[in-house]
Image: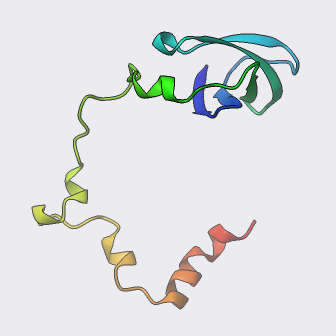
Amino acid sequence: MRLRNISASGVLIDSQLNLSEGVELMLDLGKSGQYLTTISWSRGGQAGLVFRQPFDLSVLAAVRPDVAPQRWNRPSYLDRSSGQASPWASGWERSELSDLQGDLEGFLKR
């Protein structure tokens, strides 16, 4: 399972398991603690879990996730001082609004 987001009332997870609504789960957040949750919905490999009691988000502030890198290395294409142009720059830097609308129109329609 992978935690996608968290709030005071619940979490969104990705899961390959077939989770049934109404089932209680123990959510283990490592050093942040363990919390009882109830599955409120489950569809398409995702599920919403509701905390039994409101979750205090401040407990996460003192704990760094194991997957977080110690330092993020900025890719060279984001550094304008390197002289290397972004592979996307030419298509976006000087476009008119009508050009952008035409380029994005297929993406904006359902």
Q: Note whether 69 is above or below 18 in the view shown.
A: below
Q: Position of residue 52 (x, y in %)?
A: 76, 18
Q: Note whether 36 is above or below 11 in the view shown.
A: above
Q: Residue at x 51, y 81 (%)?
A: 100
Judge by depth and name the residue closer to the eye, 25 or 47.
Answer: 25
Q: Residue at x 30, y 29 (%)?
A: 69
Compared across the picture, whether 19 is left or right of 90 comes to right
* Location of residue 88 (image quadrant): bottom left
Screen quadrant of the C terminus: bottom right
The colour scheme used here is rainbow
Furthest toward the left, the residue is 82
Q: Residue at x 73, y 17 (%)?
A: 17
Q: Residue at x 58, y 82 (%)?
A: 101
* Location of residue 87 (image quadrant): bottom left
* Location of residue 21 (image quadrant): top right
Q: Position of residue 74 (x, y in %)?
A: 23, 47
Screen quadrant of the N terminus: top right
Q: Position of residue 44 (x, y in %)?
A: 76, 33
Count of residue discs: 0
Q: Note whether 98 is above or below 24 in the view shown.
A: below
Compared across the picture, whether 104 is left or right of 36 comes to left
Q: Note whether 104 is above or below 97 in the view shown.
A: above
Q: Position of residue 45 (x, y in %)?
A: 72, 29
